[in-house]
Image (cartoon, helix red, strand yellow):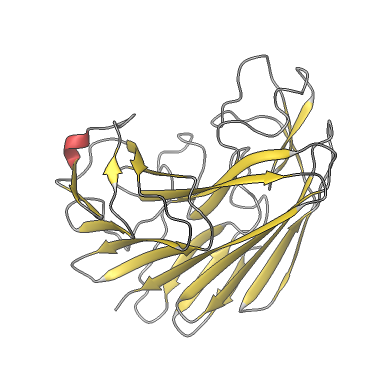
Amino acid sequence: MAYHLHSEELDVRIADPGEDYKGARFDWSGLVTQVTWRKTGMTFCGVENETPGQGSGGIGICNEFGIEEALGYSDAAVGGRFPKLGIGLLQKLDEDPYFFMLHYPIKPFMIHREGDERSVRFTVEPEEVNGYACRLEKTLTLEGAKLSIAYRLTNTGGQPIETDEYVHNFLRIGSYEAGPDYTLTWGGAVEVESPEVGNRADLKLDEKQITWTGRPEGEFYSKLTVPTIDSPFTWELRHVPSGAYVRESGDFPIDRVAMWGHAAVISPEVFIRLSLQPGETVAWTRTYEFFAE
């Protein structure tokens, strides 16, 4: 059953682990499926793909650990297990490289939840395999129009941990599709690297701001180059005619930045690099601010 956080401004819906999302890619704990501005009913979240069976099932504000290389994948034998943080032990299918879009068979981690209408904490209990294990605590707290997501990751295994984490923000403000009415503004100057998907001609850059020259046709994806920023970082996605916006900031150094989307959603992605020796703990926080008149 979904969990709800409430303030005077916002209603935040959080899926129970394994409820709305059962895939092998995104963290099952603290998955925000919708944020609603209570006075007007304006919503801020969309889905990865509206066509059944297409995409990887992403929705709303959901994060992923190790998109390029899951922990312990190279150490696992075919048919053996490797951990995907926030989800469970996945089964290695063959000798091919790890690919985040595949649905590896899952043995889910035990996830505990406790909280009230303003804050909820998810604890993902570790299960060691080949020396890899992490305890993940994720606390979501709502204060007014701000939602903070505080992470605490502890290496409980015998192997060093080298991975990354990002949030795949599947954002759609109200019913408004991507296009010239949206702006994506960064805290520093930004450049678009050669896009891997889509046509760069659809994008217009003005130092810190990205806009679209028309409604995107198909998917777009680009790695972005931003100046070295220790912390905090910030970006803002705004629907200009309505004035509604989503703004994210974080208290950690940026590892890299990307942007994905299509006509229905725009997804800014900010990565953090995580390195933990056995017994070490690292903590970081992402804060989201929402506004709609």
Q: Is residue 21 above or below residue 173?
A: above
**Residue at 68% over, 78% down:** 116
Residue 61: image location, x then y, percent: 50, 56
Quadrant into which the N terminus falls: bottom right
Q: Is residue 248 left or right of residue 178?
A: right
**Residue at 77% over, 23% down:** 76
**Residue at 39% over, 50% down:** 268
Classify residue 248 by image quadrant: bottom left
In this view, the residue in front, 82 or 47, is: 82
Q: Is residue 227 left or right of residue 58?
A: left
Q: Is residue 271 above or below residue 39?
A: above
Q: Is residue 98 left or right of residue 12?
A: right
Q: Is residue 156 above or below residue 128?
A: below
Residue 11: image location, x then y, percent: 50, 74
In this view, the residue in front, 131 or 24, is: 131
The residue most toward the left is 213
Residue 80: image location, x then y, percent: 79, 24
**Residue at 70% over, 34% down:** 71
Quadrant into which the C terminus falls: bottom left
Classify residue 159 by image quadrant: top right
The residue most toward the top is 95
Classify residue 3 by image quadrant: bottom right
